[in-house]
Amino acid sequence: MTSRTTGRALRLLSRLPVDGYVLALLGTVVLAALLPASGTAATVVEGTSTGAVALLFFLYGARLSTREALDGLRHWRLHLTVLGSTFLLFPLLGLAARGLVPAVLTPQLYAGLLFLCLVPSTIQSSIAFTSIARGNVPAAICAGSFSSLAGIVLTPLLAALLLGGGAGGLSADGILRIVLQLLVPFLAGQFLRRWVGGFLVRHKKVLGRVDRGSILLVVYTAFSQGMVAGIWHLVTPARLGLLLAVEAVLLAVMLTATWYGAGRLGFDRADRIAIQFAGSKKSLAAGLPMASVLFGAQASLAVLPLMLFHQMQLMVCAVIAKRRAHEGETDGPTAPGAPAHEGEPTASEPRAHGGGPAGPEAPAHDNEPPVPEPRAHPRPTERVP
């Protein structure tokens, strides 16, 4: 009986969408805990990490298609709804969580939770789950792109305003770091896109590995600094458990608010799906390098809530996307082959604005870790709870 129960547990775990990149991030944290960089090595690693952050934002700028963003302006109500969820509702919930300090969250973990609420939405995973759920994929592409673009300015600004000294405040030095490491490389990428865009498309797989390797370096640097500074004694297993519980509530509130709120605003089902997935998710790829710039030696604790939330959102949204697709099959209006939105491609054949690819494999301008696609839909004889 025990072996049967164990077998069921193992089969359940095998279905969870835990991607290899998240495991690589966790392995990097363990490496930093066992072999933290110190002395001269720390100086070299920190300098390399600074260059990696600048490279990341240069590639963000070079990959973000201005044409896609302009083509998506006709869905301005949808994009404003996603931006409001990402940069207004999320921060308000983060501020409300201040009441959990210090009984539930330490001040350091709360700063990380609030920073998580300020990070822009994802692009690739929002598109993937919207496609699986048979939603408005072009809208998800543009909403994710707008959120990433706005986050270049809004995330550091909101962090400086709401986190105060924990994120560098509004000091001239903090503003200069943000401009030099984030904004200038991003604008340079946008300016040079017409010349380097083709190269990036031809070598997107190789550059994707460079992106992810750069983020791993940022994580190693942040957690090494945390180990050397001795801040990890502030986090106990009980505190981590409470943090996970708070993040689960946060995700549940946002998923509920974006779904039913979009319905109250008059959006159709396909648009509601895009709003739910784009408005309730946070970008690990954008948040990690921003945290390294804003928090410095305190970045390790600041990014911990974001890393945990990222994996949680993948697991939960994979289940929701599968259920939305099943509901669409039975409801009729958004069944496979039916138009997802007037004038848009059908849900079974999503396409990006500007003729680019869409769905789980695209677009190339986002370097989020690949989203594990949920299992195939249940057979007709199986019932979905």
Image (tube, rainbow, N blue to C red):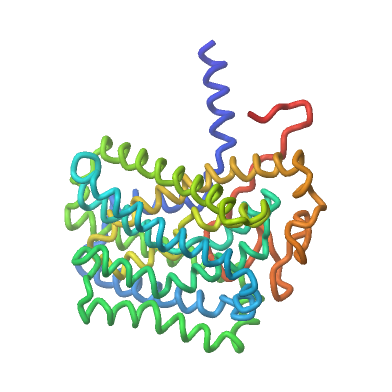
Horizontal relation, residue 234 to residue 362: left or right: left
The outermost residue toward the right is: 337
Q: How many marks?
A: 0
With respect to residue 343, does 117 lie above or below?
above
Q: Position of residue 211 (x, y in %)?
A: 49, 68
**Image quarter in which the C terminus is found:** top right
Q: Position of residue 304 (x, y in %)?
A: 34, 51
Give the quadrant of residue 299: bottom left
Residue sitting at 57 percent across and 66 percent down? 77
The outermost residue toward the top is: 1
Horizontal relation, residue 371 to residue 172: left or right: right
Residue sitting at 40 percent across and 41 percent down? 249
Q: Position of residue 9 (x, y in %)?
A: 53, 25
Give the quadrant of residue 7: top right
With respect to residue 204, does 246 lie above or below?
above
Foreground residue among 88 and 382? 88
Horizontal relation, residue 73 to residue 293: left or right: right
With respect to residue 140, does 103 lie above or below?
above
Give the quadrant of residue 215: bottom left
Q: Position of residue 11 (x, y in %)?
A: 59, 29
Residue sitting at 53 percent across and 65 percent down? 367
Foreground residue among 97 and 261? 261
Horizontal relation, residue 113 to residue 81: left or right: left
**Image quarter in which the N terminus is found:** top right
